[in-house]
Amino acid sequence: MSALQGCALISLPFERDFSFRAGASQAPELILNELAWLDTWEWELGRDPFATVPRTSVVAHDAALTDVRIQSRIAELAVVNCLDASFFPLSLGGDRIASLGPVRAAASLGPIGLVSLSARADVSDAKDGDSWHAACALRHLNDCAAQTMLVGVQALNTATQQRLARAAIQTIAMAETVASDAWHAAVASLPERVYLTVDMNVFDPAEVPASARPTSAGLPWDVVVRFLRALFRQRQVVGADVMGLAAGAGDAVSVRAAARLVSLMVGLRFPQAPAPRTET
């Protein structure tokens, strides 16, 4: 990949009847609106990423689209275009399965490792007869990756654990992520190129209450920051997304958390501002 020219924020306002709470289709617009006026200085980085990193916004499709396969193909093409233009693609969703198009785009340029931060495993073969349900998302994503690591998971049963083992998905449970830094070794075992997908349900509901498929507990903000710093430092993150925010009126805290996460990712991906383009 040539030197990055900036960051592309790609809106994927995709939503079906997958979730406990509606509102995922509104998430990209809410996050972008928050970024438009949010003070994006990152104390974890000691700078404002958006002060120096050029960015562009792309709306891949509209919220009326509900077919997963069509949505994923449109999103894949949008992300491929951004990669071809040497922009770091950071997609905003949207239902969990909306990650599929961006992951396919990243994998089209060579083998990738997949890092999924999610409280749910999402490796079902089908849910209510639907093999494209959000509960099947990681199974589809894993098919695109040379290696997959699931971080922060807590909602498991015996059948799910067996599916994870059969798929050879490395799993770091929520309690393990909080209690130790054992995931450093796990990150070191990943391929050099990785794609990062974050479901907002991985966070503690006290910090991000408006997730589409919440769980009873989750990771504190500072634990996620430590993990992301290690990941971006040790591996080349070729694309990322923030999914699973289901926000509406009164959910400013959750929207702000998602916007801060986007800003942090940009700062970690661009530890130094990209050189300006020169005209020849």
Image (cartoon, rainbow, N blue to C red):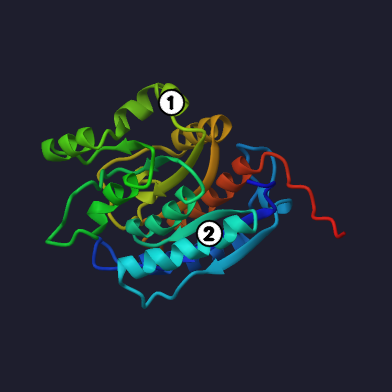
Query: Can you give x and y, in whole percent of width and height, for residue 121 in the image?
Result: 26, 43
Give the mark, 2 or 1, whose residue is nearer the N terminus: 2
Say what secondary structure mark 1 lies in: loop
Say what secondary structure mark 2 lies in: helix
Q: Nearer the viewer, residue 9 or 31?
A: 9
Left or right? Give the position of 218 relative to 5.
left
Q: Hey, what amino acid is under mark 2?
A: Val
Left or right? Give the position of 2 relative to 110.
right
Does 43 sit above or below residue 17? above
Query: Can you give x and y, in whole percent of width and height, for residue 16 in the image?
Result: 28, 68
Q: Which mark is residue 189?
A: 1
Q: Please tell me how many numbered marks the rendered image carries.
A: 2
Residue at image location 30% in from the left, 32% down from the top: 171
Q: Residues within 10 Å of mark 2 (few under 14, many from 20)?
A: many
Q: Which mark is residue 80?
A: 2
Q: Hey, what amino acid is under mark 1?
A: Ser
Residue 194 appears in view: yes
Residue at image location 47% in from the left, 44% down from the top: 195
Left or right? Give the position of 192 relative to 270.
left
